[in-house]
Amino acid sequence: MMTFRTTGRTLFLLPILLSILLTACSGSGTAITGQNTPPSSGGTSGGTPPPPGAFNLSTSVSSGSTTGSISPSPAGTSCGTNCYTYTSGTSVTLTASAASGYNFSGWNGSGISCPGTGPCTVSMTAGRSVSATFAPPPPPGAFNLSTSVSSGSTTGSISPSPVGTSCGTNCYTYTSGTSVTLTATAASGYNFSGWNGSGISCSGTGPCTVSMTAGRSVSATFAMPGATTGAPAILFSDLDSGPSTGGQDNQGVFVTIWGKNFGATPGSITVGGGQVASIVSWTQGSGSYAAWSMDKVVFQLGSQAATGNIVLTNTNGTSNGIPFTVRAGNIYFVTPNGTGNGNYATPMSPSAAYTVMGPGKTFYFRGGTYNQGYSPVGGYTDRNYALDQAHGGSAGLPMAMVGYPNETAVFEALNASRNNFAFGTGGAPASYVTLANFTLHGGSTCIEDGGFWTNAKSGGVGSRIIGNVLSASYGGANTMAGLIMIQNDYWRVLGNEIKDTGTGAPINNNHAIYNQSGASETEIAWNYFHNLRMGHVIQVHTDNYYTYSNVRIHDNVIAKGTNGDSRAINVGTANGDSYGSIYNNIMDGVGSNFSAIAIWSGSWKIFNNTMYNIYTPGSSMVFVTNSAYVNFAAPASWLPAPVVELENNIFYSDGSSPYISLSTSNPAPIVTVNHNLYFNYGAAPSQDTAPRTGNPLFANAAAGDFRLQNSSPAVNTGIATTVVTIDHDGVGRPQGGVVDVGAYEQ
């Protein structure tokens, strides 16, 4: 088995502990100072922290304790007032009892889906906080209507008309017989998928009208959008905001969208219902590796565009929508040797562009090679661009640096130890920066956030790295870094190709995307990694212990290629309350005798991944352990043990590699395994409660096409999850009544 090395920076650990850490993970970073985040208790929702292998459930009455109470069954072990401790996986039923003069009106909380006013059942696979609301009964001749969002309040909302008299949170009182129309509004990135409730008859996704002849409870569910089979599906865009005027021909910014089934013949594009000014290019996906084939359309916004969804229509139908905001901002054009003022006809130099950079501005870099330092900032002149807070964006006004459509803008690092873009200059780092459509060749890395590995959340916030081609020279072989370094929250790394990087013998401290310093709410998706010689390609880790919240790693392709040797995804040192999801990824030929996916801490949902020909004879395809905690006495914030759900994955071994390995250290990981498909290494592992076995019958694995043939045992044999609502092609799940196993829906 190949071993991990530490960065050598964790000097406070005893030498003997360092030697044990060699089998764990790597850490790195670059410099500015910041404040550490205090550790939090793993798996706790309040009260005394739970023991290993257990979670706390806290309950509360949002309308006040005199209005009613909540009773759990079973009661659990007390961890404080209205706090109960349960062994992981325990099913707990909560019953609400109204005090005299009140009525129960609904549930709210984390990790629950309880519409209506009946008992609420929660699964204790994580810490939970659940509240109940009680309202005074309506006056004679009136009834209460309570509303809730079963998929969580961040996914959308319900608006009643007329509004009625308030009887509490999302509770409205109406005179008997009143007709109330409920309208569901999806949050950005979600679609409304349907109604549920008492006394209603509302199908479809239009408004729901209820007659208040009795008390009513109505809930709405929202989900990520997905296309039907064969219909166009938009996956992501480079810009998510920009002006509709100014720039070339006064038609605003250029926007690029990527997706599936756009068709060979151009169709139409609308933004916020308005037709775009022009379609610059319409390209079908091509290439020798089918899983990475995406269609691409470039259009210019124009004055008819409005804030709303980007929607594509062709002969196959109308796509899902992705949000775009029309806003004010200046547009500039740049060439390597420009001498003008930045207009389209008189482009400016890269150095001149730096002097005017700031929030809301968009810069288009024309084709050519950019190989100088363009930001004269102290000791940071050896980067192509070093961007501080004044030379970046702000919330609602991102700054975009984009390769001009259908031209190749190449950034070359000045030396083998530096990068192309650094979001830091020793002071406050740049935030809300979009980098898109570039070819980047870095030294030790390409894009580096402005933080430092020992300081939690010390980099810039909210940057978008979209549709670039990246590689690095690795002049210093042990970089202790990633080609893309993320050190703060809300980054989006989408649709990039990262390739042709590494040393003769892979070094564990080298990565392609390195999510560190507690960077949370990050999305790493639709990227293509190949011909890389390194440790884990996607790494979530820092030598210090930080909480990583809602990290989403999905729909990536990680392939060995002709000269690769790497692992795929690793979650290393993190506090026990860290959590996220890993789904719809395709891993082909990787493993490097260690793992495709390794989990050391936190709660992670690993769903619908396709793992093919994985090489891990010295370990296993998926490796879950708590040995790092046991071996080098990590702080209590690491607890509880890792909590992992493995569902709907395809395990296709190379013939010598086991499927799953679970640590037996105390406290042992808590792993739920079911509805996975296993092939080429004997029987399914005993941990799987509903296994499938057999050849998954891919369409053409040799060409990178991991779609399923009609007779595949993966078709219609999965289990529905709230995490995965679309497949690798953007198709909604399920298509045949039951979810398919693996990254594709048949």
Image (tube, rainbow, N blue to C red):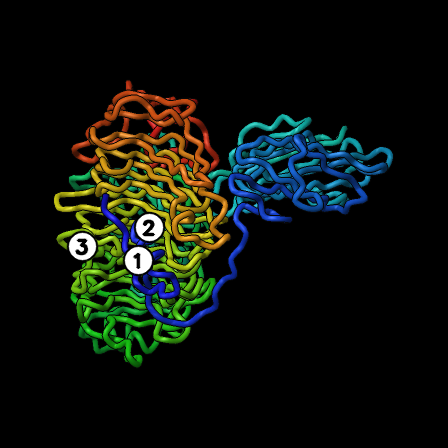
Instruction: From the viewer's perspective, tell me whether residue 129 is left or right of residue 496.
Output: right
Q: CA distance from mark 2 to mark 1?
A: 8 Å
Quick one: label 1, few (<14), some, or many (20+) residues within 10 Å?
many
| Image height of 516 relative to 668, above or below | below
Q: Nearer the viewer, mark 2 or mark 3?
A: 2
Q: CA distance from mark 3 to mark 1?
A: 21 Å
Q: State the image quarter where residue 357 is shown.
A: bottom left
Mark 3 vs 1: CB contact within 8 A: no
Q: Position of residue 714 (x, y in %)?
A: 33, 24
Q: Is label 1 in a helix, a strand or a loop? A: loop
Q: Earlier in the sequence, mark 2 or mark 3?
A: 2
| Image height of 702 relative to 55, above or below | above
Q: Is label 2 in a helix, a strand or a loop? A: loop
Residue that numbered label 3 is attached to: 501
Of residues 469 and 503, the one nearer the viewer is 503
Of residues 639 and 394, the one nearer the viewer is 639
Under mark 2, the amino acid is Ala
| Image height of 201 relative to 489, above or below | above
Q: Position of residue 399 (x, y in %)?
A: 38, 66
Under mark 1, the amino acid is Thr
Residue positioned 33% across, 47% down in the render: 570
Q: Quadrant of the N terminus?
A: top left
Of residues 633 and 648, the one nearer the viewer is 633
Per the rendering, the mark at residue 57 is: none
Quick one: label 3, few (<14), some, or many (20+) residues within 10 Å?
many
Under mark 3, the amino acid is Thr
Q: State the image quarter where residue 111 is shown.
A: top right
Residue positioned 45% across, 41% down in the render: 666
Residue that numbered label 2 is attached to: 24
| Image height of 395 relative to 117, above or below | below
Per the rendering, the mark at residue 6 is: 1
* Residue 741 seen in this snapshot: yes
